[in-house]
């Protein structure tokens, strides 16, 4: 074998091993995240239906949401651990495993707008928005390994924001959305 052929085979072998190791790590990580979701689901309702979207994403819908929630679902998008170039790109951009929560309230909020993620006190919360139309609440979390407790805290925040408020009192952390605000 020529040196260039050896190099090609070696690079292919590294990608091959990385693919299977990354797929194995994603299976373990999805089990961790799904376990955290199942533990936290009691705060927003009973019964969770899990639907897988390939190897790197799953959706959880709460079958019987507790009042004041009318519907609750989340989508978990795992990092592409099986593809090193995409993993490196996402890590450079600060992306981790992502959990997107959508909640519909029994009584829609009077006004929509962006919430200040820092004021919500949930680690990894990168986006939070209220809307007058469904979904009434959208939360986006970047969940690092060991930060799964942020999921339970986000569930509690969703329930808190769904509670009816006295007129004229916005939820904590809410700010008026301006034209310059970035969409979540």
Image (tube, grey):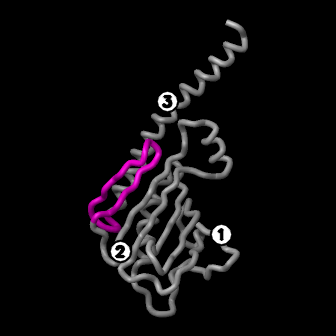
Q: How far is the residue under mark 3 from the one under mark 1? A: 37 Å
Quadrant placement of the C terminus: bottom right
> Mark 2 against mark 1, which lies toward the viewer?
1
Q: How far is the residue under mark 2 from the one under mark 3? A: 40 Å
Contact (Cβ within 8 Å) of mark 2 with mark 1: no
Q: Residue at x 51, y 92 (%)?
A: 168
Residue with the mark numbered 3? 20
Please say if 84 is above or below 105: above
Q: How many marks?
A: 3
Tell me where residue 4 appears, x and y as whole percent.
Answer: 72, 14
Q: In this image, 83 relative to 135: left or right?
A: right
Tell me where residue 170 appears, x and y as whole percent.
Answer: 52, 85
For residue 180: magenta? Answer: no
Tell me where residue 125 appears, x and y as whole percent.
Answer: 55, 63
Mark 2 crowd level (few <14, some 14–19, many ≥20, 10 Å Cα): many
Residues rendered magenta in the picture: 42-63
Q: Residue at x 61, y 82 (%)?
A: 176
For residue 59: magenta? Answer: yes
Residue with the mark numbered 2? 69
Q: Earlier in the sequence, mark 2 or mark 3?
A: 3
Please say if 16 is above or below 160: above
Please say if 36 is above or below 6: below
Secondary element at tag 1: loop
Q: Residue at x 43, y 39 (%)?
A: 27
Mark 1 crowd level (few <14, some 14–19, many ≥20, 10 Å Cα): few
Q: Residue at x 55, y 42 (%)?
A: 80
Q: Earlier in the sequence, mark 3 or mark 1?
A: 3
Residue with the mark numbered 1? 182
Q: Residue furthest right?
A: 3
Secondary element at tag 2: strand
């Amino acid at each position: 074998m020529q040196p260039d052929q050896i190099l090609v085979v070696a690079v292919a072998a590294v990608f091959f091993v990385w693919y299977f190791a990354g797929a194995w790590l994603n299976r373990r990580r999805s089990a961790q995240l799904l376990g955290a979701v199942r533990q936290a689901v009691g705060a927003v309702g009973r019964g969770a239906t899990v639907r897988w979207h390939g190897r790197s994403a799953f959706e959880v819908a709460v079958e019987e949401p507790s009042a004041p929630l009318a519907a609750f679902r989340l989508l978990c998008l795992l990092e592409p651990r099986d593809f090193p170039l995409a993993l490196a790109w996402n890590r450079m951009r600060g992306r981790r495993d992502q959990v997107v929560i959508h909640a519909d309230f029994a009584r829609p909020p009077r006004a929509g707008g962006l919430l200040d993620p820092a004021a919500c006190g949930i680690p990894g919360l990168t986006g939070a928005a209220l809307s007058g139309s469904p979904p009434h609440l959208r939360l986006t979390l970047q969940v690092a390994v060991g930060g799964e407790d942020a999921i339970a805290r986000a569930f509690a925040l969703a329930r808190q924001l769904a509670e009816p408020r006295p007129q004229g009192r916005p939820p904590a952390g809410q700010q008026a959305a301006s034209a310059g605000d970035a969409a979540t």
